[in-house]
Amino acid sequence: MRASALHFLSVPVRLPRTLSTGVYSLGTTRPRVASTAWVAPNSVVVGNVVLKEFVSIWFGVTIRGDNELITVGDRTNIQDGTVLHSDWGAPLTIGDNVTVGHMAVLHGCTVGDESLIGIGATVLNKAVIGRNCLIGAHALVPEGKAIPDGSLAVGSPAKVIRRLTEEQIEALKLSAKQYVENAIRFKTEFEPFE
């Protein structure tokens, strides 16, 4: 190939310095996003959604607030590829200091403070996850199921297999804290590569 045919490869490409936040209104319904929250540029947050202080919404997340309210509590992280949705009569409420693992699906349920939802887990309408719970990777929590505070639940359908130890509960809190720190880093340092 002649050098002139490859000339276009050396032309610098300038990308915009600003990144889209992926936060959209739906008609007159606008998401309420705390100024301390971080929303990855390729995630989508639409409509009837509240993101509280220091929430982090990671890459590829979809939060579709076209029905009942979706609330994400203080210092909670929603990791890559997760889907949050609600149904009429089944709002979605996620407490404070919660970690939601990659590719999870939370639909019209309630998750208590300082819990962890494992990678690929699914929690369905009107299920209630207590405080300080760990829902195992790929678990399925069926509609209306209640998981008591401090429980480890695994399987499909999810079953409580034991109580968490104090050390495990502290690790859940540490997970949320580390994600707050990482989100601050991304909020201040993440930019397009030029």
Image (cartoon, rainbow, N blue to C red):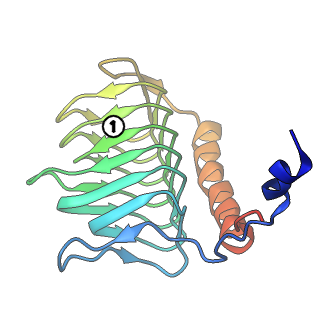
Position of 165 with respect to 154 (left or right) is right
As drawn, 89 above or below 193:
above
Residue 30 is situated, as x and y percent measured from the top left of the image, at 27, 77
Position of 146 with respect to 17 (left or right) is left
For the point 33% across and 17% down, the residue is 156
As drawn, 193 above or below 122:
below
Residue 86 is situated, as x and y percent measured from the top left of the image, at 21, 51
As drawn, 153 above or below 107:
above
Amino acid at pointer 1: Pro
Point out the residue furthest to the left here: 89
Q: How many marks?
A: 1
Residue 39 is situated, as x and y percent measured from the top left of the image, at 51, 65
Q: Residue 142 appears in which quarter of the rendering?
A: top left
For the point 63% across and 49% down, the residue is 175
As drawn, 86 above or below 103:
below
**Toward the viewer: 174 or 25?**
25
Dot 1 surroundings within 10 Å: few (below 14), some, or many (20 or more)? some
Indicate the quadrant containing the N terminus: top left, top right, bottom left or bottom right. top right
Point out the residue furthest to the right here: 3
**Toward the viewer: 24 or 176?**
24
Q: Which residue is mark 1?
A: 148
